[in-house]
Image: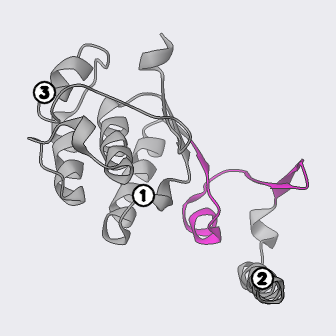
Amino acid sequence: SLITSLFLISESISYEFPSTLKELPKTLKKHFENWDIAVYSQFLNHFGISSDTRFSQLNDRQKKQVLCAISLASHVPVLVYENVESFLDPKVEALFYDYLRIRSQMGATIIMSSCRVSTWKNHASYDLYRIKEGRLYRIDQEKLNYKAWVKQKERIYELENQLNAIAY
């Protein structure tokens, strides 16, 4: 079924569970046959979230962090993340991406959207795409000039800041 094949974490979807984080795995194990409680517990610990907390008591960022732990523990074949770096702590981000790399090597398909070039540069193993003016463009990783791209983005931010200053 779709629920056991795909896990999606998006900034635009609200998730709710009535239970504590300790009780949650009992429900999830019914849906995910390869559920890994050790991975779930490890990531909760890294995020600094107590398993005694009710999911409904968490803020949005913490909810997304718990969902990351669930997604990794579920061992589904397809993982989809939208701007995951916006709710990952820098200290946990490297561990998260290392675990995604392992899951990819085990055959999982991982689809990510990201606004950060460092995410593309350091973690993508296949095709990269960019949406510009409503069109989808494939990025050739061999020709990706990271420094030039960053310089261009810095220039855009500089111009936007100047325009904002003029507007006020």
Residue in view at x 77 percent, y 85 percent? 168
Relative to 148, residue 79 above or below: above
Which mark is drawn over residue 23?
3
| Label 2 or label 3, whichever comes before in sequence order | 3
Q: CA distance from mark 1 to mark 2?
A: 27 Å
Secondary-structure class at tag 3: loop
**Which one is nearer the viewer's eye here, 153 or 109?**
153
Task: List the residue tagged with mark 1.
Answer: 87
Mark 3–mark 1 contact, CB under 8 Å? no
**Which one is nearer the viewer's eye here, 40 or 109?**
40
Q: Amino acid at mark 1?
A: Phe
| Label 3 or label 1, whichever comes before in sequence order | 3
Q: Mark 3: few, some, or many residues within 10 Å (few <14, many ≥20)?
A: some
Mark 2–mark 3 contact, CB under 8 Å? no
Q: With 138 as the anchor, is 79 left or right in this view?
A: left
Magenta-tinted stretch: 111-139
Q: Mark 1: few, some, or many residues within 10 Å (few <14, many ≥20)?
A: some
Task: List the residue tagged with mark 2.
Answer: 164
Q: CA distance from mark 3 to mark 1?
A: 23 Å
Quadrant housing residue 25: top left
Q: With 111 as the anchor, is 3 left or right in this view?
A: left
| Label 1 or label 2, whichever comes before in sequence order | 1
Residue 132 lies in the magenta stretch: yes
Q: With 133 as the anchor, is 159 left or right in this view?
A: left
